[in-house]
Amino acid sequence: MRIRVFGSITFLSAALFGCGEGDPKTTAAPLAQPFADAKISSLGKQRWARTCAMCHVRGEGGAPKIGDAGAWSTRLAQGETLILEHTVNGFGNMPPLGYCMDCEREDLRAYIAFMAYGEGA
Amino acid sequence: MKRFSRRRLIAGAMFGGLLAGMTPRIGRTAEAAAVSDSLPWHNWSGGQSAQPTGRFAPETEQQLIDFLGRDSGPLRPVGSGHSFSGLVPTDGHLVVLDRLTGLRSHDPTTLEATLGAGIRLAETGPVLEGVGQGMFNLPDIDRQTLAGAISTATHGTGQSLNTLSAYVTALRLVTPAGQVLELDAAREPSLFAAAQVSLGALGFITEVRMRNRATYRLKRRNWIAPTEDVLKDFEAQARAHQHFEMFPLTHSEYASVQVIDDTDEPIYNPQPPPDQSDAFDELMRSLVSVPPAARRPIIDAAVAATPPAEPVVDVSYRILANVRNYRFNEMEYSVPLDAGAPCLREILRTIDEQQIDVVFPLEYRYVAGDDLWLSMFSGEPRASISVHHDARFDYRPYFDIVEPIFWKYGGRPHWGKLHTLKYAQLVKLYPKLKDFLEMREALDPTGRMLNPHLRALFGIAT
């Protein structure tokens, strides 16, 4: 086994869940298809690529990867309200606003939909 | 061009005329950039929060100028929200520089490149590599914007390497009044030195010219060693290597050591799975439930059995910065080089003696001196010591115990990290702080860019 000395020790490994939101907890009533009405624009894709993509392409530390239906389904089951609350305020190792300092609610909804469903829900 | 000396700057009567002569005042035409009712804002660690009136994210410098002409309320710039201190929170507008990005120009002769100030450090690597350049150094985390990094004197490791701010050779600053200042050491040496580390208090940096190197490769090696052994040989090793630093483990006799040097070796940098968690991770995670006094034998036994990491070689930016997924809060001070080892020893001893419940390692490194007014390395090379704490827990009991140790050794706080110093202490640590504040007063006489944190740092009443 190759041991990542620096990565392991430096940040104490503790719960190295990366940019992920941590353990999903289904505390809100699930919606049929959360975020399904949100659409990403071409400008939105550029902003997504500079923010959310930093973790959600490689799945840093457990962040649900773009297009990983299984990983997203457990998040989507939490419902929009809770997912957005986690996204805006941060949760676990998910940074607040996902590094998108100029994002507003509709932007975040569109980026989540893009990662969960692709360009068309 | 007229010279923009501090004396002349402070003379209010000249202010409008001189600035107007430098850059024509732009009309207040409306534009389409985003101004909106806003979501709450939090920094990366979650330790700082605000409910801004709105966010404004200009896509061009002109949009920013127009906005400044329309709005008269409080303003704060925000990069990526990676400062742990209260530099950003405002109940006015957050000005997001994120869209002022990209490579604007480059010079293959001088190896300089001009970048949009909102570019993230992580983006600068590939962009500069594309034109045959690479930054001299990067901090451990590279998700900050360039403007945010230089405004807080963000730095990497290396006794011969400066803060990022010191590699800035020119910048464009839009004042709160909406005027553009083109600054460099030849034309405006005083204002330029102030603006290189400005805490976002002088205006909005929209463009930065950096002095770089030709693209280069680095080799990184990591291993575990007894902290005291590393410390005794630290000065020699710091001189012998481009980057030499250690991460002392708390409640342990050991430290993780990292050495990075130039190399011509072929690239070899296998990437572990991003969600990899190895046996050591699991062990360390389990320590959270172990009382601090009982951790030492467990940690020391584990690290003593840990082999050195495989050396890796890659283009500089892929070696210098690391992905830090695990959110934390941080305090960092620089102390004179000869105070570094005793200061670090006292901190580690205090953590042990007071059984402070922390499992995060510290970070210990040397950084070259510079002549920037508000750099924590102004005037001399210094040792930088960082302490971290899991963002899920209250950092204050830990940091409150450690911070006075930094003061005892002449510590200067990192502007982007947590500290409790106010103007009365800071003015003794930063001899140019008064000069800086005179510049600030001239550029922002109504204090639009001040927030409670900056007022405390600057000794300005509300």
Image: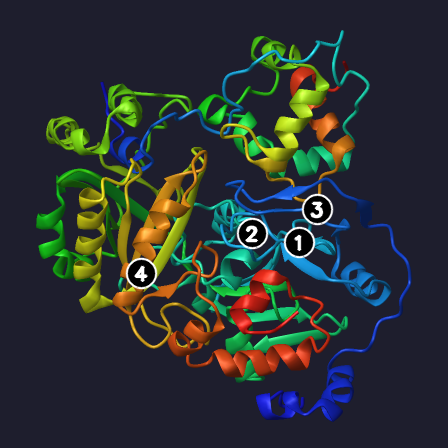
Instruction: Mark 4 vs mark 3: give the one in front.
Output: 4
Q: Secondary structure at mark 2?
A: loop
- Label 1: chain? B
Residue that mark 3 sits on: B51
Badge 1: residue crowd in 10 Å (few <14, some 14–19, many ≥20): many
Residue that mark 1 sits on: B97
Q: Secondary structure at mark 1?
A: loop
Instruction: Mark 4 vs mark 1: give the one in front.
Output: 4
Looking at the image, tell me whether mark 1 or mark 2 is earlier in sequence order. 1
3D distance between C-alphas at marks 3 and 1: 18 Å
Seen in the picture, residue B230 relative to A90 is either above or below; the reply is: below
Residue that mark 2 sits on: B145
Badge 2: residue crowd in 10 Å (few <14, some 14–19, many ≥20): many
Instruction: Report whether mark 3 lies on the same chain as mark 1.
Output: yes
- Label 2: chain? B
Kindly indicate whether the residue at mark 2 contacts the one at mark 1 (C-beta within 8 angstroms). yes
Name which residue type carries label 4. Answer: Pro
